[in-house]
Image (cartoon, rainbow, N blue to C red):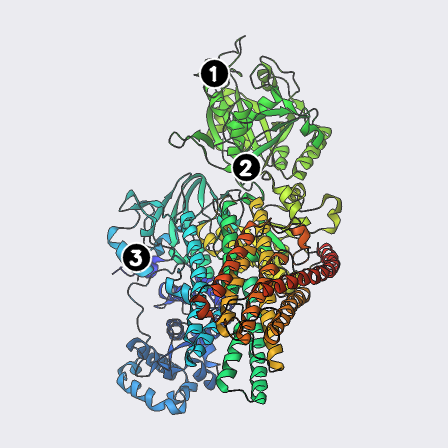
Amino acid sequence: MLNRVDTVGTFTDGKSSVEHQINIHVNDLTEVSNNNDISLKEVLAGLMYVMEYRIKGGRLPHLDYDLMKRLCNGLLSNIGHCEKEHFQNIPTEESDMALHLFGEFIQEVEEFRQVVREVPVTDLAYDLKIHRRCTSSASDEQKKSAVAVIGLLTKNFTEFADWKDLVKHDEHNMVEKVLKEYEHSLEIPEMPKSPEDLLPPQSLWIDRKVNVLLDMFKVDKDKGLSSNQIEGLRNHYGTNNLQPPPKPSIFKMIIEQVRNFMNIILIIATIVEICIGEYKDAAVLFVVIVINVVIGFTQEFKAEKALEALTSLTIPQALVIRDGTQEKINSSDLVPGDIVILDEGEGVPADLRIIEQSQLEIVESILTGESVPTAKDIKHIRSRTRKIPLADCKGNAFMGTVVAHGRGKGLVVRTGEFTEIGKISNSITSQPQAKTSIQRKLDILGKWLVVIAIVLCVIIVIINICYGNKIKETIEIGLSLAVSVIPEGLVAVVTVAMALGVRRMAKRNAIVRKLPSVETLGSVTVICSDKTGTLTEGKMGTSLIWTIDDCAYTFTESTNMDPNKGTVQKLATGEITEENLVTAVDTGKTYDTADAQLMAAILSASLCNNSSVLLDSETNQWKSIGDPTEVAMIVAAEKAGFSRSSWEKNGFTKLGEYPFDSERKLMSVIYTTTNNAPATGEIDMSANTTIDTVCPVPNTSIVLAKGAPEAILQRSISYVPSLNPGHGSLNELINGEQKPLTNEAKALIATRNEQMAGRGLRVLALAIRKVGHEEAQAIVKSENQQDSESNLSFIGLIGLIDPPKKGVRESITTCKNAGIRVIMITGDHVTTASAIARQLGIIDAENVNMQRTMKGSELDLLSDDAISELKPFPSVFARVSPDNKLKIVKALQTRHELAAMTGDGVNDAPAIKKADVGIAMGIGGTEITKQAADIVLADDNFSTIVEAIREGRRVYDNILKFIVYLLSCNSAEIQLMMICTIFNIPLPFTTIMILWANIIADVPPATALGLEPPEHDVMERYPNDPQSGILNIRTTIAAVLQGTIQAGVSFVLYMIAKETKILGDAETKHVCTQFQYAQTVAFAALITLQLIQAFHSRSVYTSVFKTGILENKWLVYANILSFVLMLIGIYVPGISDFLENYDIFWQAWLGIIIGLIVQLVIIELLKAYLRRYEHKVNLKKKQRFLENV
């Protein structure tokens, strides 16, 4: 048990501070029902803590009246919350907390009592619902609280003197019984005491000063928690673990497959067959159901296993102070109140409040999307709300983020699911999984088929009753028709087609978690892509250095940290144009051959820098430590031949540093050098040499600075002179006369800065200043930044960029040709985002005015409807928050777009979950994001998405092909049976014949159609309308007419065989009756026509003479297999008896061949018409796409 803090003087918050804290909680109380980020329990716990340690015991008997009025309304609105249990309304834990607070504020605060006095007694009775805490199932604590509230109201207010006015009339007896049980509490009413271990609720505590927070958690920042506190804190707060998302059990996965609409119909048909004694038919139907379920289950199971292999959740260790000593513990053992040590390169193990820091910068990109590190401080924030952007919480560090630079100490304030990452994780796992496009379309198709089956069965029953046929015969005919309507192989074939697509996608680095997403990806109309790491490399590199003598230098392979890869090249002029960039040539990389201005720029960039790059001896891979921007400069210096270590080896010694902060927007360092003069020989500046005793700039002290161009220019009075390359040129540049910084020079700097920013570069300025040795020492001792950062001499500009990935521009062009819009969503500045978008072709350089770029702050001002109605809809969204991303996805879906959303950070997860297709990064993505996604990219490459879309379209096309094929086959059976039924002609098939035909003629060819290669124009067509069904009017007519051809040919052959001997005389040869022979002829004719129909179905619109017959070898093999199975069913004794088939003669086969020719001619005429119509439709789709863009 933890000791309770009950000393009045422990906390020094004044009245205004307490009112400020209560006001925040009251605002949360009013918003809690509309904001998933706020927990009612957390809000009430915060109020209880304020009451216990700021108000109770006469500390603050008077508070603002209006604030108390809002608080009273907020508490009363939450006291009535209850949950159903055993048919009773049981008050929730939160409602008990609200009632307890209501009583305590009556007890402690005069203004709260004034507010309560004004509440009508009927309203108060309705809100309090005292009787619910007086039932037999109520706990002792609930009864005590109810009695105490009644006592406080009746003793303090004449308006409520009769307790019966506060309770429903029919509940008087029950309440009275409880009042008698606790009548001693009514004499001097007082709310039950709070638990002895009342602890601070889990919150960011942005508004509390460090010393107050440490007092609240009873912890010393230098000693940490004591061992005897840990267990009690862990029991109260729980462990620092994120709950993994629930994985579906094998049983649940199987049930999901069984619940498929068409499987349910087949199950019903199986039951009916058993009921009427047709066990053979029932057995075959059961086998079909099992095959469907097994195929679907197997694929989903494999997908989950594939993701498990890709993702792993590792819990890092944390360095904490406990019992006055530092120790490493598992981060899962952290509790609120722990003191955590933060060091460069380490991950943040929980949500912290920073209590000490030294140049602390943290990369929070997984939460904010911003790749630039955030500088941290220990200042508290006075705000009326807790809804502050995470990027503005400078005094906090968040779980899962990484320390880029500096050191610090943090107080753990939130752990586990209460952390920012934990809240996002919970919001994702609690969202219901929406059905994908193909699931919705197949559901609609299945329901239509069932309706058709029911209608046809009713018609059949009526017709047969009119003809006076037997009931059992009527049921068998109805079932035969139902079986004909339902394409038994559809579920299995769709699943197999998508599974094969999954395998092909996996080979292209796209791992599919949810099977139906394969087809959905092929139907997307918009891709919302995160910029960093998806469209770009996700690594900062130095792209350009421009020096004040109007020379420019570009770097190759700038993001490759290997110093031996890439080089520096000089442009023909300082004008930064594509022509100059293409014609750039290698420049000198030694002290004697390099330009002095370039060396000065590298000197400033590499020494005014705290990051480093090193070769890992175990992995033989280069890795970086520190700020990504500074790392890019270090890498550039290495490639230019002048590393930081080489400067230091050749005499440069650091005296002091003034670190970067967001107010000054720059950083400066002070260096001094040795007395050795430059030798006549070459000075070796490579990183791999031994220490050289010769200094390139001897006996000199200098200030080096880098920062925002405006900040450096404001502090500069001169610029370095222009010198030819040569031995001693750098020394001459630094020690020589500097030139005044004229307006013309400033104009040139501004022009080049705009050119670089216009290319999407993050531009920093570099400067230098020579000082005397004594002055250098004085600058360090003074600790005054102004002494260091004034009278600077301007060197040049350095431009850094997260460069576009190779192949992305081409992939975006492919998307445009396919009618797919690409929208960039980024946390970067608008200028940078727009420049990258132009480079990638997301913004058309020739049509810039017709395209829009929008900031997240602008989105916040618009309603969801207003965003969806934006014209033109923005192509770039910059400076966005997680809420903005979710709004964008919802707006696109409102516009009836089928949206894919990519991302890697935790902040992307809600939008990824909401999107029609969520795509996570496999390398840079977080565990939570991957769990929310439908597809995971193993290589984090946008081009992989385009290849996956190509595969998705192929799958969609193939699904459409075999659905048209299956429905043409089944409609043939339906039409044939309907004709016979209407004219009271004996049916040409038995139920078992139909089932066998559907299995051998449907499944193998349809599966082979799922292996069709993509059509040549698959990425040149515009997407299908997401609102349309899987079949449109054209494909439906095509399927029905093709079925009519099959039915017509089969019916003619059936009637000829039944009524004449032209196709063979079965009775004379003692094979069977002529009717049974005719049934087998019809059976053989229909299956053969269906198998040939599979070749026609290789394209809905293209002639079979163009698609060919042999190109899809799997279809050839499948048709041979089906044809052999048909022959076995006709000619092999035993099997033919089971199927009720008999031998047929050559005359019948000749008749079937003639029927195939008729089929070919009619289908080719039909396709010619469909091709003309489809061309017009595609033109309309293109027009709509251009209008939306």
Say which quarter of the image contains residue 127.
bottom left
Relative side of 682 to 872, left or right: left
At mark 3, the secondary structure is: helix
Image coordinates of residue 862 in percent, x first then y, are 64, 61
The quarter in which the C terminus is drawn is bottom right
Image coordinates of residue 647 in percent, x first then y, are 49, 21
Residue 754's place in the image compared with 433, above or below, is above
Indicate which disc, 2 or 1, sits on the residue closer to the N terminus: 2
Residue labelled with disc 1? 674
Residue labelled with disc 2? 540
- The three-letter code of the residue at mark 3 reads Arg
Query: Which residue is nearer to you in this view: 1016 or 878?
Result: 1016
Residue 601's place in the image compared with 510, above or below, is above
Residue 630's place in the image compared with 443, above or below, is above
Residue 447's place in the image compared with 42, above or below, is below
Q: Nearer the viewer, mark 3 or mark 2?
A: 2
Relative side of 209 to 747, left or right: left
Residue extending furthest toward the front: 1068
At mark 2, the secondary structure is: loop
Q: Nearer the viewer, mark 2 or mark 1?
A: 2
Q: Nearer the viewer, mark 1 or mark 3?
A: 3
Image coordinates of residue 423 in percent, x first then y, are 44, 58
> Marks 1 and 3, Cα distance to the nearest angstrom?
57 Å
- The three-letter code of the residue at mark 2 reads Met
> Marks 2 and 1, Cα distance to the nearest angstrom?
34 Å
Say which quarter of the image contains residue 1162.
bottom right
Residue labelled with disc 3? 234
Q: Label 2 near label 3: C-beta < 8 Å?
A: no
